């Protein structure tokens, strides 16, 4: 990860901010693991089973679903920031070939390794066609929805990949909108227009997915549109960050507030989490699908949680000893470094512990059919230890070597092009020029 500043050697506060972003990844990865273990051990059930099985713990566990949102905001912010600099400062346009190569090497190798493992060991007896195998490989399981044991949370991978494809087009649109004015403040406002549309569209789609005629958990639930609002907020934070970096006297109001009262933003995140727990217009502590009104209220709370959590971590010169203590410690930063692998593999560990899947002699069953096979604390200990171990091996011996190989290839290409560019820019000697 590069510094969040202008590319100069990061100072002490920049290093802390980078460490905090690693830490928030690790923290959110653990939150996602906890909520999935809770759903897979009967801590959270449908309201038809009666009051929440574990009382207040069931209510709090449901709310932990908010842990996924910060990942999308981080992606939108970090990936769009070079494009925002191009529009606001006039830096060169990011090279799309490098952009897609880096994104592909970060996202796909670990995911394809997981896909191969799950197809061969957990779902082999369910393979009935070539398309069954190809569907997850080409990232189309969200649209032609099919459940694969061990790949339960990977519906977010196509969402992330599709955002990578859309982002350069959005950046071009925003660049053209902003290019018609010269005033930086007006540029920022124009760039925010498509992002505002994305946020509203995501909120509306969240309600649409819960229309009665679609039924509970329709295929549309896995489509990426309701998450685009989180990406848009991340892109908006990138715009505000570039604005603050390029004109220190024009720091946006939200960042000024984060400088003065950073912990107050985390209070806002806590309040948003409690709203999700309370489930207005729904049944607290259950996995009931809910009405459109319920979904739209929950969507606002989800987005608000991610926003309030992230703003003080990315605002220039914002600092909080609490945040540094929670996020910058070595264990949390390490978890952040391998967080993608933890996210990918934690359901696999569950299925192996349950001995559920083709390798154990029978087609796999859904996780919610196996809630009596392990208690919460037992399964949580196994999943945390197992997913950290697998993610560590995957990152250091598979994912990172491939990413470094890609970076070496990019450097060789740049070195090969540089002499040609310098030669083209060097004027010919006067006599040669005359002869031409």
Image (spheres, rainbow, N blue to C red):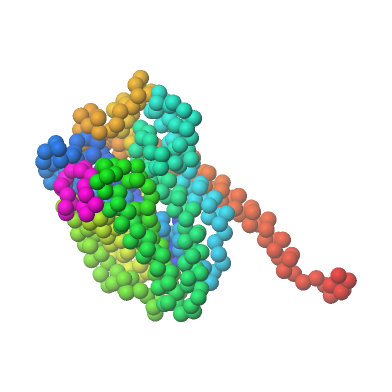
Q: Nearer the viewer, residue 425 or 165?
A: 165
* Residue stretch in magenta: 279-294
The rendered magenta stretch, by its main secondary structure, is classed as loop
Does residue 174 appear to the left or right of 331 in the view shown?
A: right
Residue 150 drawn in magenta:
no
Does residue 144 appear to the left or right of 434 in the view shown?
A: left
Point out residue 368 in the picture as x, y percentages from the top left corner. 25, 33
Question: Hey, which residue is sitting farthest top in the picture?
Answer: 361
Q: Nearer the viewer, residue 212 or 365?
A: 212
Say if residue 8 shows up in the picture.
Answer: no
Q: Is residue 135 above or below residue 406?
A: above
Q: Is residue 407 above or below residue 357?
A: below
Q: Residue at x 49, y 51 (%)?
A: 103
Question: Which quadrant of the rendered structure holds the N terminus?
Answer: bottom left
Point out residue 414 in the picture as x, y percentages from the top left corner. 63, 57
Q: Nearer the viewer, residue 425 or 200?
A: 200
Q: Is residue 39 above or below residue 374?
A: below
Say if residue 249 shows up in the picture.
Answer: yes
Q: Nearer the viewer, residue 105 or 272?
A: 272
Quadrant housing residue 57: top left
Quadrant housing residue 235: bottom left
Does residue 40 appear to the left or right of 183 in the view shown?
A: left
Quadrant housing residue 155: top left
């Amino acid at each position: 990860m590069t510094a969040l500043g202008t590319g100069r050697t990061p100072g002490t506060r920049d290093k802390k901010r980078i460490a905090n972003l690693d830490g928030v990844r690790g923290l959110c990865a653990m939150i996602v693991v906890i909520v999935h273990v809770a759903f897979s051990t009967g801590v959270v059930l449908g309201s038809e089973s009666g009051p929440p099985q574990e009382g207040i713990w069931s209510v709090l566990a449901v709310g932990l679903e908010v842990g996924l949102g910060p990942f999308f905001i981080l992606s939108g912010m970090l990936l769009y920031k070079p494009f925002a600099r191009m529009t606001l400062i006039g830096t060169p346009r990011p090279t799309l070939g490098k952009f897609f190569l880096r994104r592909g090497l970060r996202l796909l190798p670990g995911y394809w390794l997981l896909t191969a493992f799950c197809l061969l060991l957990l779902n082999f007896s369910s393979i009935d066609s070539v398309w069954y195998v190809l569907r997850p490989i080409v990232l189309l399981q969200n649209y032609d929805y099919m459940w694969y044991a061990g790949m339960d949370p990977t519906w977010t991978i196509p969402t992330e990949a599709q955002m990578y494809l859309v982002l350069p087009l959005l950046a071009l649109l925003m660049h053209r909108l902003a290019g018609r004015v010269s005033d930086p403040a007006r540029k920022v406002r124009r760039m925010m227009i498509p992002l505002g549309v994305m946020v509203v569209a995501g909120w509306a789609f969240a309600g649409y997915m819960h229309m009665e005629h679609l039924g509970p958990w329709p295929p549309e639930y896995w489509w990426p549109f309701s998450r685009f609002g989180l990406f848009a907020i991340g892109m908006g934070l990138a715009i505000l960050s570039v604005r603050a970096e390029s004109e220190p006297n024009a720091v946006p109001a939200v960042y000024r507030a984060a400088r003065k009262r950073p912990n107050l933003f985390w209070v806002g995140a806590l309040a948003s989490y409690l709203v999700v727990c309370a489930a207005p217009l729904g049944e607290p502590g259950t996995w009931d699908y809910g009405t459109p009104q319920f979904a739209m209220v929950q969507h606002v709370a989800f987005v608000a949680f991610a926003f309030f959590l992230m703003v003080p971590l990315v605002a220039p010169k914002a600092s909080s000893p609490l945040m540094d203590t929670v996020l910058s410690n070595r264990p949390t930063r390490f978890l952040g470094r391998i967080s993608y692998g933890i996210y990918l593999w934690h359901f696999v560990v569950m299925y192996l512990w349950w001995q559920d899947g083709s390798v154990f002699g029978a087609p796999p069953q859904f996780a919610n059919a196996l809630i009596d096979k392990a208690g919460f604390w037992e399964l949580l200990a196994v999943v945390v230890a197992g997913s950290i171990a697998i993610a560590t091996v995957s990152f250091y011996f598979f994912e990172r070597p491939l990413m470094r190989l890609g970076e070496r290839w990019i450097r060789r290409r740049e070195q090969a092009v540089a002499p040609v560019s310098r030669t083209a820019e060097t004027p010919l000697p006067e006599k040669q020029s005359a002869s031409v």
